[in-house]
Amino acid sequence: MDDILAVERRPDRVIARLNRPEKRNAIDREMIDALHVLCAELEADPRILILTGSGDDFAAGADIAQLRARRADDARRGINAMAFIRIRELPMPVIAALDGYALGGGAELAYAADIRIATPRLKIGNPEPSLGIIAAAGATWRLREIVGEGLANEMLLTGRILSADEALSAGLISAVREPADLMPAAHAIVDRIAAADPLAIRHTKTALRAPRDAHPAIDGELQAELFESAEKMRRMTDFLERKGRP
Ligand code: COA
């Protein structure tokens, strides 16, 4: 049987494909467990992550058959929320490459990524209240941070699903690419990130995630470490030598 999360490992990046296409990659407990295993690997050995789907979709939600059976204690455990927070907190950037449906928990997994790109077939949103639940795996706070309160309120209260163009205008995705170009575009983003100093990228991600009142102290601390690094000296010396200023 194919893995529910198909993982390809390269030296500088890992590509993880939600792999349940017959259920439009609906996120079930087994997939969440596999995401935790992947997070443990990437926490120990940080690499850039591309998250994508199999078939024509990213994920049409959390698995509704499993959700129906969950009770109050399961809700309090935040089964999907905890996994998506762990993905958000990974040391290196996460890129979500989205096609087709990214609904409910699928959308929330995408919101947890640092960068999102999509095909013109994207349909992204949170219809949870129509199923009698809230979007509890990040949408109520993360979507607002990404697109602002007005649109987040509308999406979460009305279940409005955005097209790729609407998501692009709202800043929810940063590029639209034809299906055949989606993964090359994701890899091109990774190539750009991978060309920079990995520690500077990790520190940038840490600073981006820090709460407002942690700035500017946290930036100074992170920069202090980088100002002493051999890699900074090497990269800046290379630049100056290329310009003929040793
Ligand atoms: N959970 C469990 N199974 C799901 C699923 C989900 N979130 N989304 C799709 N599936 C399953 C369908 O039940 C179907 O399985 P089956 O072939 O065994 O019956 C299969 O995936 C294909 O989906 P289907 O509904 O036949 O495709 P469609 O093109 O008619 O409709 C959607 C696509 C996305 C509109 C529809 O599947 C849907 O509304 N899904 C739920 C979306 C949702 O509310 N997500 C939020 C959950 S938190």
Image (spheres, rainbow, N blue to C red):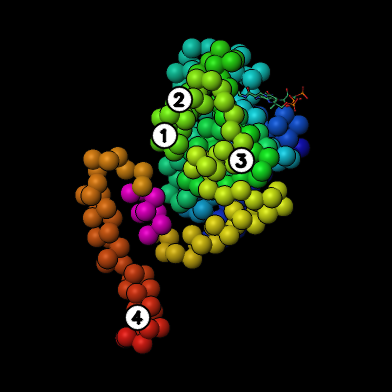
Question: Mark 3 or 1 closer to N-term?
Answer: 1
Nearer the observer, disc 4 or disc 2?
2
Residue contact between numbered discs 1 and 4, judged by CB atoms under 8 Å? no
Say what secondary structure mark 4 lies in. Answer: helix
* Residue type at numbered disc 1: Gly
Q: What element carries label 1?
A: loop
Query: Upstream in the sequence, badge 1 or badge 4?
Result: 1
Residue at x-position 34% and y-position 69%: 232
Indicate yes or no: mark 2 CB to ligand 1 under 8 Å: no
Tag 3–tag 4 contact (CB < 8 Å): no
Say whether disc 4 or disc 2 marks the residue closer to the N-terminus: 2
Find ligand 1 in the image and state its quadrant. top right
Residue marked by disc 1: 148
Identify which residue, 181 or 160, lies in the foreground: 160
Alpha carbons under labels 2 and 3: distance apart: 19 Å
Question: Is residue 53 visible in this depiction of the protein?
Answer: no
**Disc 3 and disc 4: Cα gap in Å?**
42 Å
Q: Which of marks 2 and 3 is nearer the N terminus?
A: 2
Figure disc tally = 4
Measure how far apart labels 3 and 1 are at the Cα level. 17 Å
Judge whether 19 appears above or below 128 on screen: below
- Which residue position holds label 2? 153
Q: Considering the numbered disc 3 on the image, is that residue within a helix, a strand or a loop?
A: helix
Q: Name the residue under label 4.
A: 240
Relative image position of residue 2 (x, y in whole percent): 74, 40
Residue 26 appears in which quarter of the rendering? top right
